[in-house]
Structure formats: structure tokens, C-alpha cells
Image (spheres, helix red, strand yellow):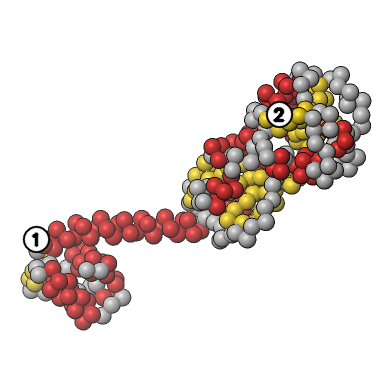
Amino acid sequence: MEIRHLKLLEAVAAEGNLSKVVDRLNVSASALSHQLKEVEQELGLPLFHRVNKKLVLTDAGRILLKSAEVILGELKHASCSLMELREGYKGELRISTECYTCYHWLPGVMKSFSQEFPGVEVSIHPEYTRNPIATLMNGKIDAVITSMREDHPGLVYHELFRDEQYAVVAKGHPWESKPYVEAEDFRDQNVIIYHKPVETVSLFTQLLIPNNVTPKKITELELTEAQIEMVKAGYGVKVIAKWAVDPYLKTQPIVALPITKSGLTRIWYLVTLKQELPKYFESFRQSLMSHMRA
């Protein structure tokens, strides 16, 4: 039995004869009659009584019609959902980022985005922060916000914005009077980072490694608040984006210094798999860009 047979049953039950179904299903009367005989022979039961010129459902017909209405209703619902997905009005966007500080961007972005696309569910997954790209490639998330770029043919990097990194130290630190700090200045410092390997940290990849500088100590702390407390107490220096440290500069005894005369800048990306993206994806990217530039 095929879907066309269920559609025929539903239509004939509603109209009462085959001639009225011709235009509805866009099939000739002889073809419809053949289809009806075909399904009745397959079932071994008549689906309609022939009463004068009218077709009346048998018990078997009524049983099958109930199932047909459910199946055809589900197919119609699925078709509408797929159309909404294709047109970009419905879907799911699962996001992770390379560091925990980034997550405070997302609630504001989600609020503005959901007003434009209420049928798209955006979910945040901090549990994948340690290895978001691998998680993306495994299909567990749909996009990653990161400043680290890997050469991989299966990934696409959509540029979001650029931010400048600053070195944060306690007030009274020997660096406080400097107009900026350079690679060599980090050699005798305890540098606080979110997590290793250092090859994932822009300070190291863009400045320290190229200049063959290894800090005296490297401390891993995943919480920005804990990092700031360490800096404030004089136990290390932290390199962080200006937008991330600004709230602390207003309330804590710390200062932020440029790194090198030309500055240390990162490019942030929204990374996806190389595939056709839903229409709402670009709107989400634009919302994220606008939020960060505000």
C-alpha cells in the first residue's frame, strides 16, 4: 500500500464517488478506479459499498480511513516543518565557544535574534568549551565562536570582529608606568591563562613563541574572576581583551596596558561545517557582530 492509496481513500470517503475526486487528485477516473481495485485486492477486503452511484465506506474502509487520516496528517505536518526549515523560519542552532568569558555575549544576542526568528531554538553548550572544534566535527553542535583558526577542508570560518588584547597587572606593578609591554617583558612573569596548550593562546602564538620567550611560570585558571583576584594580589599578569576587563578596571586596583607598540589583535570567527547553511545563520552572525560592536 502506498501514500497515493491513502489519499484516494480519504478523498473518496469525503466526496462519495470517483468522478468528484478526479480534479482533487489530478488523476483520471479510470486510473482512480484501478488504484481502488488494486488496494482492495491487496487487502482482500472491500473498502466501499457501491450503493447506486455512491461509494459508502465498509467496516474495513472506516478502519483504514482512521489510520490514513493520522498518517496523512503527520506527513502534512512534516512537510510544513521541512518548508519552514528550508525557508529559515524554524530550526536549531547549537553553539559553543573557545573560552568561558565569551558566554556572556550570547544571552543578549539570543534575545534580539529570537525576536526575528522565534521558531529557531538557540542552545549554548559550555561543556564543549575545552574542545569545541572536534565537537563541531562530530555533529554535536552547529557552530563555534573562536579566535583560533585551523586549516581544515571541512570547516568554514565566518569572520565576526576583531578585538585588542591588553596586559592586566596590579597597581604598583613595575609595568604600570610603561606605555606598552613587549615580548621580553613576559620572560620573568607568571602568566595566567584559561587552559593549556599554550598553542591555543593568542599571546603565545602571536608574540611569545615567535620571539622565543618562555614565561617564568604559567598558571591555568578557568574563571576570569579568579584570574583578576590573582592579578590584584600581585601573583601574576593576565592578557585579556579590553571588553572583558573593562568592568573590573572600574572597581579593582588593576591597570591594563597595550601589548607592543602596534597592539596585539585577535580575529574572532563563527565556525561551521562546510555545508549549506540555513537562512537564519547569517542573521545570527550579524546579530553577534552588532552586539559586540555596540
Classify the position of the N terminus by image quarter: bottom left
Along the viewing direction, whichever of 260 and 5 lies nearer the viewer: 260
The quarter holding residue 129 reads top right
Task: Please state which amino acid type lies under the numbered disc 1.
Answer: Asp
* Disc nearest the viewer among 1 and 2: 2
Residue 289 shows up from this direction: no
> Residue 293, position in %: x, y?
73, 41
Q: Which residue is mark 2?
A: 219
Q: In the image, what residue occupies the spot 64% across and 30% down?
A: 222
Q: Earlier in the sequence, mark 1 or mark 2?
A: 1
Task: Please state which amino acid type lies under the numbered disc 2.
Answer: Thr
| Residue 173 marker | none
State whether residue 52 is above or below residue 139.
below
The quarter holding residue 266 reads top right
Q: In the image, what residue occupies the spot 64% across and 41% down?
A: 98
Q: Residues within 10 Å of mark 1 (few under 14, many from 20)?
A: some
Along the viewing direction, whichever of 274 and 82 lies nearer the viewer: 274
State whether residue 181 is above or below residue 60.
above
Q: Is residue 58 left or right of 201 when viewed as pictured?
A: left
Q: Is residue 57 left or right of 92 when viewed as pictured?
A: left
> Residue 76, position in %: x, y?
34, 59
Q: Is residue 147 left or right of 65 when viewed as pictured?
A: right
Q: Is residue 172 left or right of 250 when viewed as pictured?
A: right
> Residue 34, position in %: x, y?
19, 79
Q: In the image, what residue occupies the spot 64% across and 57% down?
A: 152
Q: Which residue is mark 1?
A: 59
